[in-house]
Amino acid sequence: MWKFQPKYRSLFVQIIVYLYILLFVYASFSKLLDFENFRVQLAQSPLLSAYAGLIAPSVIIGELFIVLLLCLKGTRLIGLYGSFFLMVDFTVYIYLILNYSDFIPCSCGGLIEKLGWTAHMIFNSVFAVLAMVAVIILEKEKGAGAGTIVIKSVLPSLAAVGVVTGLFLSSEYIIKKENNFIRRFGQHPIRDEKAFDLGANSYYFAGIANGKIYLGNVTAPLRLTSLDTALTNKKVVKIKIDCTGHPFRSIQVKVQCPYFYVYDGNVPVIYRGQLGDSLARTISFEDSYFSQLEVIDSISFVFRAQSSKTKTQVLGKLSLNQRPKVTLNETLLEKQVDGVFDTDGQLLRDGQTGKLTYIYAYRNEFLVMDGNLGLLRKLHTIDTISRAQVQVRLLADGNHRMDAPPLQVNKKSAVYGQVLFNESNLMGKFESREMWRQAAIVDMYRSGKQEYLGSFYVQNRGKNTMSRMFATDKHLFVLTGNEIVRYRFAPVVMRYFKTGEAENLD
């Protein structure tokens, strides 16, 4: 480079300066013109999610400040150093994303956004080299030695690399363990594979067995519908029960191989039938009233009911081969307001591990229990509502009435392989309102420890939104309108599933 005449060296530096001014002005104004989208994209970064609110404006201000330094002859060298350090940061940022992250966002604007991530890293590296060459030319013209240039460039570069790496490590911890309500959406965690028209919108998931999805129907409660998981063949069985004289109000069906169960907690009765047969016989009568039921095995059940002593909701276990048959755990569901509405939620059983989950509807908490209702852990969702926001009035007859609509936190949930899938009802930071109008947002959590795994969208199908979901080892099945839709999990989701009891120790 020094063989060239000074005027050519000066021209070379000038060209680099102009390129950087053009690059940073273009990039910063692209971000400013679509700032909300830039901040949303930055919040998806596995390196910077927790700091998106601070970093989004800082990057724009930093780029414009460097432009100002480059425009002034007296500060041009400082501006080139700043350009070099910023490009080193950007390059390391992309390297970490490509090599250590499951989530690959985009936080660039304009034409640069069209580049692939590898091409983007090469682009940044080339600009970093150009900046360094310009710095060497100007420093040499000032009489600086090689040692001085190394100290002024390499050491700060290492510090810049350390800052980006530190942000990555701390952001990952905050997002997964101490999330302050920032969601992170992965690259296509589910893929829409197939839909099947059921002809009605009154179905719910009853279970899975022998490669078939079983559906109950609230308008035809004694009909059990089965579909192969390929969603090609549909079969309907009309269930017969051995005693029909009860004042049923809400009959439900649940399947757990090799049986199906029919129950109505308003009437203390449970029937059991063999899959492949249509007759269900009474196996429990007048043992307990309940509002929700999960099957442990052919003679054991867990349920949610209202305590006759405290008038609050409790979880209990029904064991048909023991005395007493019913045991209640009155300490699991924690009262915050009235013990009824504030403890409302969904009782789930993990078909892979057998563990139980109870996720509250109006607060950011879920419980993980063993099959005997022993509490294993209390975990939290990423929203900030820790206390149920319900207004309740106690009536003269001892019943409770809700005075105002509550703030619902969690809507519908499913669990499989120690991964809890939860449809949230609350918008997080830096999220697009447009996407909330177009899709349901499902968050994923480990049920074995406190860890948020990420989120994904389940797109509305026309005017129909997701009404229920059911997870298996490879698929997420969704009911929406008259359809059942099958989505395939990406490998990045399936790798979270726990497959054996030995893995449940965490």
Image: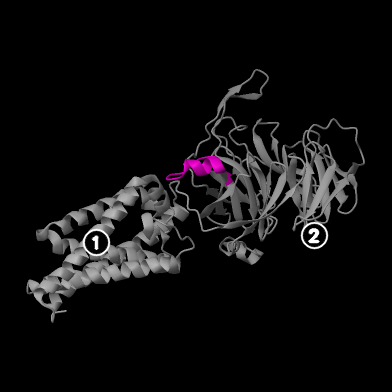
The reply to whether residue 491 is visible in this rendering is yes
> Are there few (<14), some (14-19), or many (20+) residues within 10 Å of tag 1?
many
Say what secondary structure mark 2 lies in.
loop
Boundaries of the magenta span:
423-438
Q: How is the image coloured?
A: one colour
Q: Quadrant of residue 410?
A: top right
Residue 345 horizontal side relative to residue 13, left or right: right
**Which image quarter is the N terminus in?**
bottom left
Which tag, 1 or 2, sits closer to the chain's start? 1
Q: Residue furthest top?
A: 396
| Position of residue 364 in the picture relative to residue 149 (left or right) | right
Name of the residue lying farthest toward the left: 143
Queried whether the magenta region covers residue 425, the answer comes back as: yes
Q: Quadrant of residue 190?
A: bottom right
Are the two marked residues, 1 and 2, in contact with CB atoms closer than 8 angstroms?
Answer: no
Please, what is the three-letter code of the amino acid marked with disc 2? Asn
**Which part of the image, by quadrant, shows the C terminus?**
bottom right
Considering the numbered disc 1 on the image, is that residue within a helix, a strand or a loop? helix
Q: Residue at x 55, y 58 (%)?
A: 188
Q: Nearer the viewer, residue 476 or 482?
A: 482
Name the residue that disc number 1 marks.
Answer: 20
Q: Is residue 23 above or below residue 218?
A: below
Residue 431 location, x and y as percent? Answer: 45, 45
Viewed as shown, does residue 7 lie left or right of 127? left
Q: Position of residue 500 (x, y in %)?
A: 66, 65
Q: Which mark is residue 210?
A: 2
Residue 213 vs residue 98: left or right? Answer: right
Amino acid of disc 1: Tyr
